[in-house]
């Protein structure tokens, strides 16, 4: 395997781990803001823009926040990797 292929595999693995970490962050945000703030009597809920605060922070703020975070991470850490042939023309299949 060429050095270029090894670098591409490392980069792809790194991007996969970053993606899993981002998903974990989003899930934890959603879980704790939904079940932490939403675990009360519905009569005592506070509201933000007509939504219960647990829903607003878990689903609306969380979605916008993770979307911005993913955009930043992709711009900073991800790079384009050619999926066709290597520089030596042998391809990446073997």
Image (cartoon, rainbow, N blue to C red):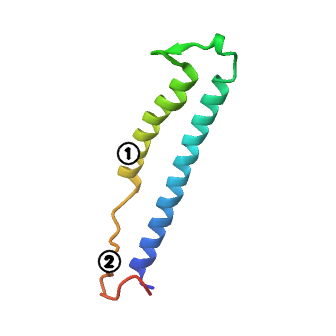
Mark seen at residue 48: none
In the current view of this chain or complex, which residue is farthest to the top?
43
Above or below: residue 19 compared with residue 27: below
- Indicate the position of residue 37 as horizontal and vertical percent values: 64, 23
Q: Say what secondary structure mark 2 lies in.
A: loop
In the current view of this chain or complex, which residue is farthest to the front?
42
Q: Say what secondary structure mark 1 lies in.
A: helix
- Indicate the position of residue 33 as horizontal and vertical percent values: 60, 29
Residue 11 quadrant = bottom left
Residue with the mark numbered 1 = 71
- The total number of labels drawn is 2
Above or below: residue 1 compared with residue 66: below
Q: Residue at x 55, y 53 (%)?
A: 20
The C terminus, quarter of image = bottom left
Does 3 sit left or right of 88 as displayed?
right
The N terminus, quarter of image = bottom left
Q: Residue at x 47, y 59 (%)?
A: 15
Depth order, front residue of 81/32: 32
Q: Earlier in the sequence, mark 2 or mark 1?
A: 1
Residue with the mark numbered 2 = 84
- Tell me if mark 1 has few (under 14), some (14-19) or many (20+) residues whose alpha carbon lies within 10 angstroms of its own: few
Above or below: residue 64 compared with residue 39: below
Tell me the CA gap for discs 2 and 1: 26 Å
Depth order, front residue of 2/67: 67
Residue 67 quadrant = top left
Q: Residue at x 39, y 51 (%)?
A: 74
- Tell me if mark 2 has few (under 14), some (14-19) or many (20+) residues whose alpha carbon lies within 10 angstroms of its own: few
């Amino acid at each position: 395997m060429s050095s270029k292929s090894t670098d591409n595999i490392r980069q792809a693995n790194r991007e996969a781990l970053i993606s899993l970490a981002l998903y974990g962050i989003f899930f934890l945000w959603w879980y704790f803001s939904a079940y932490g703030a939403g675990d009360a009597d519905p009569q005592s809920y506070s509201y933000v823009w007509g939504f219960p605060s647990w829903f607003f922070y878990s689903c609306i703020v969380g979605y916008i926040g993770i979307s911005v975070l993913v955009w930043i991470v992709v711009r900073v850490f991800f790079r384009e990797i050619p999926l066709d042939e290597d520089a030596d023309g042998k391809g990446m299949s073997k």
